[in-house]
Amino acid sequence: MHGPNGSIPKANTWLLRTEHHGEERGRIFFKSRSTREIRNLQMRKNISHATTTIREKRKRVVSEVPNWEELRTRASQIKQHTLANLDVYLEEFERNVTRAGGKVHWARDAAQAREIALELVRESGASSVIKVKSMVTEEIGLNAYLSENGIEPTETDLAELICQLAGDESSHILVPAIHRNRVEIRDIFEATFAQKGSLEADPPKIAEAARKHLREKFLRSTVAISGGNFLVAETGSVAIVESEGNGRMCLTLPNNVISIVGIEKLIPTMEDLEVFLTLLPRSSTGERMNPYTTIWTGRPPAQMTPERETTEDRKSYNIILLDNGRTRVLSDEVGKQALACIRCSACLNVCPVYERVGGHSYESVYPGPIGAILTPQLVGDALAGDLAFASTLCGACYEVCPVKINIPEILIHLRSIHSDHKRDSVSGNLERGSFGIVGIVMGNTNLFNIASASVSRILKYGGPILNKIGKYLPPINGWVESRNLPKAPNDSLRDAYRKGTLDALLKK
């Protein structure tokens, strides 16, 4: 349930990464955090290089699929149908998982999901776990919780491992360490497990060092924790797509597998999965197909390795289905589109705001355009309402989304909710009064002409001074903090039209 002013119970707020610690997480201040992050020129260079590369790769492989738009439409229809009948498909999924020897656990929020996962790890007797890349485990704060309770988690995805070793936060849905370059990664490895001076800042060498570091953990771990890209209701199957093979190792070597997956990841059939396995790799990594696609159902046989003298009769397989606010999002006819997201990150790679301020500015596990519409709905407008304004509404995200989520529409919807919540506040009254004055001026030709001429003269004669002192003068301080005021033209558009010089002005 929503609290006052659109707040959400604190159990849902672990996905926030604000500069407050503990169970009480603070409100997101996108504007102030992004102002700081945008000054990090190395980060901006790293992200720009990476997103440009991914965009070009995506463009090439998408152009090879003649029915791409038809596939997008079909994927959108599948998601809409599934979300409209989610209760039916969840029950079908549970029946088929149970029939195949697995066990389904239901978690209403992050706290319950963490408790279930910890109990399952303790039942296995393990003191450490290996992990497949999973955004939902980040959402619930699982790593910190396991560590606090004496269980050592190890990320096996290379980018996630980099962030873990650096004590860093991921800044991209697909490429968590996108804000780091190869030299920084080399330095992180040498500061944690590699001998100083032993590594070159060369991707193959860095990957080899990570492989050696993880090998023993793969072979000796008895518990793996994963997320899931898709849940298939008709078979009770879980599908994971990846590029490195670490997921396959995690899902086949340990005798106990725990998957934590959001309830929105469900699709009805294996035939539906084919559609998404065509769309996802092209939209995310710019590949025709993922190097590793693992689909498993229930409880597979245990594996014998030289390091283990015996094996258990069968693996244990547990899946935790997480709500954590998702059923509440479903009740919003506009906002529920966000639950169709397949975490491809295509929207991040085309977003001009994300490219300039980076993922950390969003102060959430889910950055970028999708985070700007998902986070406020999961944690509430009171904590994350700022994110709805982290967009130019250019629409590029909607154009590339493989499931046709209308992100600009949802952003406008969430902005409306935010405005309603602050209607009676001081800032709300000031904003409403300001727009009221603007409306009066814009609606009166004489007032508009006077205002235009006044602004033009101020810019012409006082612009240089305002650029220097403007940071102390609201409301222009938000502009001059990072750019100069524009120079006023000699003639306004209307004056040029009257003088017959409009064509010459437009050619400039």
Image (tube, rainbow, N blue to C red):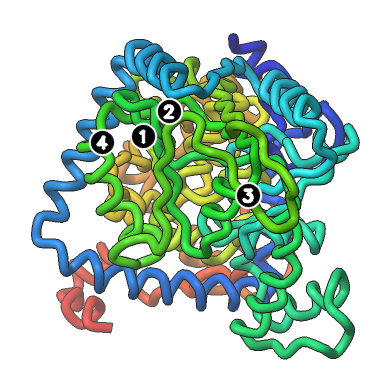
Q: What type is the residue that disc 1 sits on?
A: Ala
Q: Compare residues 38 and 255 and report the one nearer the observer.
A: 255
Label 1 CA crowd tier, 10 Å (few <14, some 14–19, many 20+): many
Q: Residue furthest front?
A: 309
Q: Which residue is mark 4?
A: 270
Q: Which residue is mark 3?
A: 304
On screen, residue 9 versus residue 407, left or right, reads: right
Check contact, mark 1 vs mark 2: CB within 8 A.
yes
> Whole-Å distance between the Cαs marked 4 and 3?
30 Å
On screen, residue 504 versus residue 118, left or right, reads: left
Depth check, mark 4 against mark 3: the one in front is 3
On screen, residue 138 versus residue 401, left or right, reads: right
Task: Name the N-terminal-most of marks 4 and 1.
Answer: 4
Q: What type is the residue that disc 3 sits on?
A: Met
Q: Is residue 84 above or below residue 151?
A: above
Q: Which residue is mark 2?
A: 264
Q: Based on the displayed image, in which of its 4 quarters is residue 182 positioned?
A: bottom right
Q: Secondary structure at mark 4?
A: helix
Residue pictured at 77% horizontal, 25% vertical: 123
Across and down, in percent, residue 387 comes to: 56, 41
Across and down, in percent, residue 482 comes to: 64, 67
Residue pictured at 19% horizontal, 74% vertical: 502
Q: Compare residues 12 and 141 and report the one nearer the observer.
A: 141
Depth check, mark 1 against mark 3: the one in front is 3
Depth check, mark 3 against mark 2: the one in front is 3
Q: Residue furthest left?
A: 66
Q: Which residue is mark 1?
A: 340
> Whole-Å distance between the Cαs marked 1 and 3?
39 Å
Q: Secondary structure at mark 3?
A: loop
Q: What type is the residue that disc 2 sits on?
A: Glu
